[in-house]
């Protein structure tokens, strides 16, 4: 009889103990799942309000969501009495192995974040980098997509962009452009210079401020070379140069 009472007492203690743990684990699970949705939803609103790139917003949203859920899962199984130290160690080792195998991709990801945060260029800008010149079509997590003048699509890794030289050709509304005009000695140099000035001043694409400049940059046996410096809107130089050369022909 005494043994029966003892076993009933032990059983009741186990039921109370584990039922409490189960209820606590269930509460942690429910609250944790709600928090994962609440935090990621508000994080997305904040990032979008700060005009962070949508691709990065979605990635950070997913990363935050699954990180919180992973922590909730560990907390739940720990409350149920499962030993989690070895489990966490395995996850850490796996994370280290993945990080080492994907270190190039991680560098590109970090570069993408730096580009989005510091904005050396944006979608629609014309840039020159890594030997390529083109219009930025898309800034992705691991690479940036540009379209060249001959309509080629080029993907440049963000790690190279964030650590290398970038020339943004669209960041300023105006640009100074230099080109040379060579004339033979048979022509009157003062008349040619006057004609160049007249042609430049009559071109509607050439800005009057700063003033255009004309210099003799080279004098040789074959002729005289003039260096012409003019300011135009960023996208007008090639058309302006063509019109000037046609007028001087």
Image (cartoon, rainbow, N blue to C red):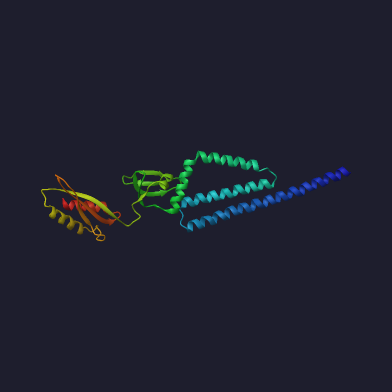
Quarter holding residue 206? bottom left
Left or right: 68, with 56 as reference point = right
Give residue 175's position: percent from left, percent from top.
29, 55
For the point 52% across and 51% down, the residue is 61
Q: In the image shown, does 101 or 43 lie closer to the viewer? A: 101
For the point 77% across and 46% down, the residue is 14
Give residue 194's position: percent from left, percent from top.
15, 56
Q: Residue furthest bottom?
A: 209
Q: Is residue 170 above or below residue 1?
A: below
Left or right: 232, with 123 as reference point = left
Left or right: 83, with 154 as reference point = right
Left or right: 71, with 245 as reference point = right
Tally of numbered tags: 0
Q: Residue furthest left?
A: 186
Q: Quadrant of the N terminus?
A: top right
Give residue 112's position: percent from left, percent from top.
45, 48
Q: In the image shown, does 158 or 124 lie closer to the viewer? A: 158
Q: Residue furthest right?
A: 1
For the point 50% across and 49% down, the residue is 59
For the point 79% across and 48% down, the residue is 13
Q: In the image shown, does 228 or 247 lie closer to the viewer? A: 228
């Amino acid at each position: 009889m005494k043994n029966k009472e003892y076993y009933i007492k032990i059983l009741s203690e186990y039921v109370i103990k584990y039922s409490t743990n189960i209820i606590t684990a269930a509460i942690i699970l429910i609250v944790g799942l709600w928090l994962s949705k609440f935090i990621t939803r508000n994080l997305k609103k904040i990032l979008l309000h700060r005009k962070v790139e949508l691709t990065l917003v979605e990635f950070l949203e997913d990363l935050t969501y699954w990180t919180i859920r992973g922590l909730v899962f560990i907390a739940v199984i720990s409350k149920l009495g499962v030993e989690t130290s070895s489990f966490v160690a395995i996850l850490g080792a796996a994370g280290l192995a993945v990080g080492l195998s994907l270190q190039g991709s991680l560098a590109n990801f970090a570069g993408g974040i730096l580009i989005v945060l510091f904005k050396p260029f944006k979608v629609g800008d014309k840039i020159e980098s890594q030997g390529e010149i083109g219009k930025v079509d898309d800034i992705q997590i691991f690479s940036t997509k540009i379209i060249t003048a001959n309509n080629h699509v080029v993907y440049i890794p963000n790690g190279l962009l964030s650590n290398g030289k970038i020339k943004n050709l669209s960041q300023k509304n105006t640009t100074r452009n230099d080109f040379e005009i060579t004339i033979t000695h048979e022509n009157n140099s003062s008349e040619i210079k006057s004609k160049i000035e007249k042609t430049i001043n009559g071109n509607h694409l050439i800005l009057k401020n700063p003033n255009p400049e004309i210099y003799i940059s080279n004098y040789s046996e074959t002729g005289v070379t003039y260096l012409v410096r003019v300011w135009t809107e960023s996208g007008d130089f090639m058309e302006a140069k063509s019109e000037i050369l046609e007028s001087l022909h």
